[in-house]
Image (cartoon, rainbow, N blue to C red):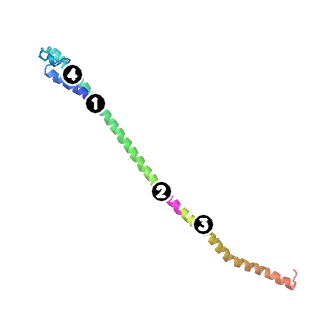
Amino acid sequence: MASLKRELAKVLQLVVGLRRGRTPGTDAKLDGMAARKPIARNNHLQEAMTLLIRNQAAFVEQIARNDQERLALKEWQYRTEEWQRKTEEWQRKAEARLENIEQRLAQIDESLVQLPKTLLQNLLEQLPKIIVQDVLEKLPKAVKKEIGFKP
């Protein structure tokens, strides 16, 4: 961009010099000398115009490249925003799943803490029934034995 500005400045200096009657390559000391023939001056004007047109074309080409780069950047930004949105959604779902897992683990932990108490309570509830049933089963045998009953 800086070189383009320098080229445009040179073209402007050339055009200003041509309007004052100077030809390219002369310096201010030669201003008093006679100007070249109008044909030569016209030739330099054509060269200056050609250079100006070339510089303008290069400038337009640079603008087009900048536009393409800007569009590519916007597309990249769109893809990045889409990726970020999907990442945030994935993170939200992962956090919800983690919360669910933590709740289930808390329930399992509570069940494991209560398990020995539950087992002991069930055993204590069942133990008298088992003992009484065993005694009742053995009682007839004992009574039969006492009286001397043989099968």
Q: Give the residue furthest to the bottom.
A: 147
Q: Amino acid at mark 4?
A: Ala
Asked if labels 1 and 2 touch by Cβ distance under 8 angstroms, the answer is no
Type of the residue with mark 2: Glu
Q: Which residue is label 2 attached to? A: 95
Q: In the figure, is residue 112 to the left or right of 49? A: right
Tag 2, which secondary structure? helix
Name the residue type under label 1. Answer: Ala
- Residue 135: image quadrant is bottom right
| Residue under label 4 | 48
18 is higher (above) or lower (below) than 59: above
Sooner in the amino-acid sequence: mark 1 or mark 3: 1
Mark 3 or 2 closer to N-term?
A: 2
Query: Which residue was labeled with disc 1?
Result: 2
Q: Using the numbered discs, state the Cα–Cα distance from disc 3 to disc 2 in whole angstroms.
A: 25 Å
* Residue designated by label 3: 112
Closest to the camera, between mark 3 and mark 2, is 3
Tell me if 92 is positioned left or right of 144 in this view.
left
Query: Residue 146: within the magenta?
Result: no
Amino acid type for the residue under numbered disc 3: Leu
Q: Nearer the viewer, mark 1 or mark 4?
A: 1
Q: Return the residue found at the far front.
A: 29
Crowd band around label 3 with a 10 angstrom C-alpha radius: few (<14), some (14–19), many (20+): few
Residue 94: image location, x then y, percent: 48, 55
Q: What segment is highlighted magenta in the picture?
A: 97-103
